[in-house]
Image: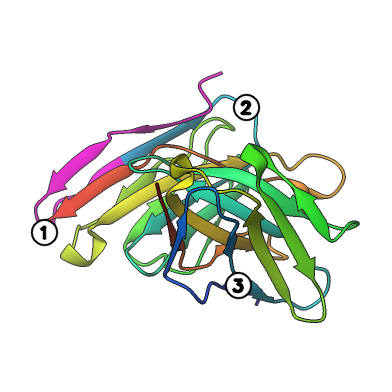
């Protein structure tokens, strides 16, 4: 089965600094990868996806993600973090049953 | 568009009680699913449906039933609540349609926080 792993439970960055939230994947065949964000007491919101094409994918709120096939990674990045980016971030892969499989999540805290 | 609507927002049950979590979407999405979210475990798929009249089990289906009589609605039933079912439950939907169904992201409701005592 397809799966993703998020190796960090928590990431702390200072406002204005670049941020990276890591994700690695395990799939057979072509990967369909997604990033979602969850704010307190809300459902998950879609940020961006990689299906095929360019390895650098741009998404909502200034986020981007870099797909690296040789390292089986799909890290989420942002050049300059905002305090309002503090949230829970989930990496996910779409299975051949069309099910979305999620990582355990990474809590991002951006300090002023 | 309301998107995906879940009711209730909060619920407290006693062990052994049954209840139904409601989910409705107004985007004409074929695919609908239920997840539970527990700390440190991400989201785990309970049941899903690829269209009206079709349902299937996910990773953690035991203790839950679903049905899909219409495209819009996908209720989740807890048959006999147990403390292990204390969790936050999310309903999600996505477009399936023609072309590549794996392209479509999920649209989530705001969740139901369930406590079983």
Circles 3 and 1 on the same chain: no
For disc 3, the chain is A
Locate residue A35, reporting x and y percent: 62, 54
- Mark 3 vs mark 1, CA separation in Å: 34 Å
For disc 1, the chain is B
Q: Give the secondary structure at mark 2.
A: loop
Q: Is residue B35 on the magenta stretch?
A: no
**Residue B83, picture quadrant:** bottom left
Q: Are marks 3 and 1 in contact (CB under 8 Å)?
A: no
Q: Give the secondary structure at mark 1.
A: loop
For marks 2 and 3, give the one nearer the viewer: 3
Q: Give the secondary structure at mark 3.
A: strand
Q: Is residue B5 on the magenta stretch?
A: yes
Span highlighted in magenta in the image: B1-20
Pointer 1 residue: B15
Looking at this rendering, what residue extends furthest in the top direction? B1
For disc 2, the chain is B
Pointer 2 residue: B27
Above-or-below relation of B80 to B103: below
Q: Which mark is residue A4?
A: 3
Seen at 43% across and 35% down, the residue is B23
Circles 2 and 3 on the same chain: no
Q: Are marks 2 and 1 in contact (CB under 8 Å)?
A: no
Q: Which mark is residue A16?
A: none
Does B117 sit left or right of B46 as displayed? left
Q: Nearer the viewer, residue B67 or B43?
A: B43
For marks 2 and 1, give the one nearer the viewer: 2
Category of crowding for the residue at label 2, using alpha-carbon neighbours closer than 10 angstroms: few (below 14), some (14–19), many (at least 20): some
Category of crowding for the residue at label 1, using alpha-carbon neighbours closer than 10 angstroms: few (below 14), some (14–19), many (at least 20): some
């Amino acid at each position: 089965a397809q799966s993703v792993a998020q190796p960090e439970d928590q990431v702390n960055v200072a406002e204005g600094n670049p941020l990276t939230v890591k994700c690695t994947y395990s799939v057979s065949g072509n990967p369909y990868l997604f990033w979602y964000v969850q704010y307190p007491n809300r459902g998950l919101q879609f940020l961006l996806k990689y299906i095929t094409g360019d390895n650098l994918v741009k998404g909502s709120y200034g986020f981007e993600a870099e797909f690296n096939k040789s390292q089986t990674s799909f890290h989420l990045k942002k050049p300059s973090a905002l305090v309002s980016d503090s949230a829970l971030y989930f990496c996910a892969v779409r299975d051949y049953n069309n099910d979305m499989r999620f990582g355990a999540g990474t809590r991002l805290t951006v300090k002023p | 568009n309301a998107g995906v609507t879940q009711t209730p927002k909060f619920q407290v049950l006693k062990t052994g009680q049954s209840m139904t979590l409601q989910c409705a979407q107004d985007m004409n999405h074929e695919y609908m699913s239920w997840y539970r979210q527990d700390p440190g475990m991400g989201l785990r798929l309970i049941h899903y449906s690829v269209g009206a009249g079709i349902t299937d089990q996910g990773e953690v289906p035991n203790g839950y039933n679903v049905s899909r009589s219409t495209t819009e609605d996908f209720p989740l039933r807890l048959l006999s609540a147990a403390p292990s079912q204390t969790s936050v439950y999310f309903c999600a939907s996505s477009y399936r349609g023609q072309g590549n169904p794996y392209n479509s992201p999920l649209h989530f409701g705001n969740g139901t926080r369930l406590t079983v005592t």
